[in-house]
Amino acid sequence: MANQKKIGILGSTGSIGTQALDIIRKNPEGYRVNVLSCARNIPLLEEQLREFEPVLAVTKEEIDARELAGRFPKTEFAFGEEGLKEAAALSGNDLVLNSLVGMQGLVPTLSAIEAGKDVALANKETLVAGGDLVMRTAAEKGVKILPVDSEHSAVFQSLQGNESNPYRKIILTASGGPFRGYTREMLKKVTLKDALKHPNWSMGNKITIDSATLMNKGLEVIEAHHLFDAPPDKIDVVVHPQSIIHSMVEYEDRAVMAQLGLPDMRVPIAYAFAYPERIPMEEKSLDLAELSRLTFEKPDREVFRTLDLAYGALQTGGGACCTLNAANEELVGLFLKERISFTDIQDRLVDWMMDFAPVKADTLEDILALDRETRIRIRETVRI
């Protein structure tokens, strides 16, 4: 159909990617899949290829791309980082949804921007590690960065219609994760199975662990700084266990605008797809009368020190956010392999950032070099 918006989906077999495909499936008159990409879940990618017949599909390994190419002649195939760059910049894309996990999302995001493609961004590490570069390049190319994280989408929605009204502060809400109310001693007994049980959201493993350590909220503070050009002292975090208010904006007259809804990532994905319009959704509506209460509390920064690490990295600058992101990503990976304990993640991050000396991180080459060096040194430190 001529009016269909062509969507390139990087990370189509993950939590965000599969929900995005569900939106497209239910709105075939408005959207078409142009690109699919997958790292390891080849069986699910095959199902998606049969249903959506994209122009291009990308796999992590060359052998998978070659094997699939023989069975899906209507689709071109690529692989690895170069494949992701090609997919992000593909000429037919009207919008690129980046739902890749971790630092691997940075280079494809920049490729999409350089090609003049709007980006629906669900990969927060892109802005945490390279926010200044990404936002500067997007401004130069006239490209929209549309937030897909529920918190940043809520802020984005709360800012609509208020472009001429300065805000007093952005308030990011946090569920508190599965260990809200825990003491330091209690955290020492946490298992991998415990940490992967988020009370409200169904997410991938990495972001679920980040939520459990509260690092996810720290990364979101850095992301909000770049998305909304907000100084750190204008970004607050409040724990809201029910995850109904997804974030808020307080204006100079003390009016607070908030976006509410049930915990469902389809809403921010759909808003990014349709912006500035909205897509009718079939999912359950929020019934305020059914809610017994909405509660709020301050995050426990003594037990969960990761939030202050993020604020500190913003203040330090000079690659601090990049190295924090890389160290966290490596440590979470080690915890997921059960090589270190849950509290090791935070303790080692604190030690790492205390010793960090600011370095130049203005270019993509600088950022990637610092990222690589951090990961190597973290592995050496852990001695795995």
Image (cartoon, rainbow, N blue to C red):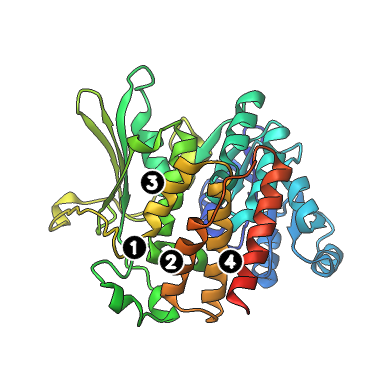
Residue labelled with disc 2:
346
Type of amino acid at the residue the image marks with label 2: Gln
Q: Amino acid at mark 3?
A: Glu
Residues 312 and 276: in front is 312
Looking at the image, residue 35 sits to the left or right of residue 378; the answer is right
Percent across and percent down for residue 123 are 55, 50
Secondary structure of the residue carrying numbered label 4: helix
Of the numbered discs 2 and 3, the one sitting upstream in the chain is: 3
Give the Cα distance between marks 1 and 3. 20 Å
**Distance between mark 2 and mark 1 Cα atoms:** 8 Å
Disc nearest the viewer among 1 and 3 = 1
* Disc assigned to residue 267: none
Determine the CA span between mark 4 and mark 1.
Answer: 19 Å
Q: Quadrant of the N terminus?
A: top right
Q: Which mark is residue 330?
A: 4
Q: CA distance from mark 2 to mark 3?
A: 23 Å
Q: Decide if residue 122 is in sight here.
A: no
Name the residue carrying label 3.
Answer: 151
Whether residues under marks 4 and 1 lie with C-beta atoms below 8 angstroms apart, the answer is no
Helix, strand or loop at disc 1? loop
**Mark 1 neighbour class, 10 Å CA radius: few under 14, some 14 to 19, many 20 or more:** many
Q: Are marks 2 and 1 in contact (CB under 8 Å)?
A: yes
Q: Indicate which label's residue lies in the foreground, 3 or 4.
A: 4
Q: Residue at x 34, y 56 (%)?
A: 263
Depth check, front residue: 73 or 181: 181
Instruction: Check disc 1 and report the residue beneath it.
Output: 304
Which residue corresponds to the image point at 19% horizontal and 52% vertical from the top-left?
296
Question: Do tag 4 and tag 2 residues touch (Cβ < 8 Å)?
Answer: no
Q: What is the CA distance from the residue labelled 4 to the residue labelled 2? A: 12 Å
Q: Quadrant of residue 199?
A: bottom left
Sequence-first tag of 4 and 1? 1
Residue 290 in the image: above or below residue 254: below
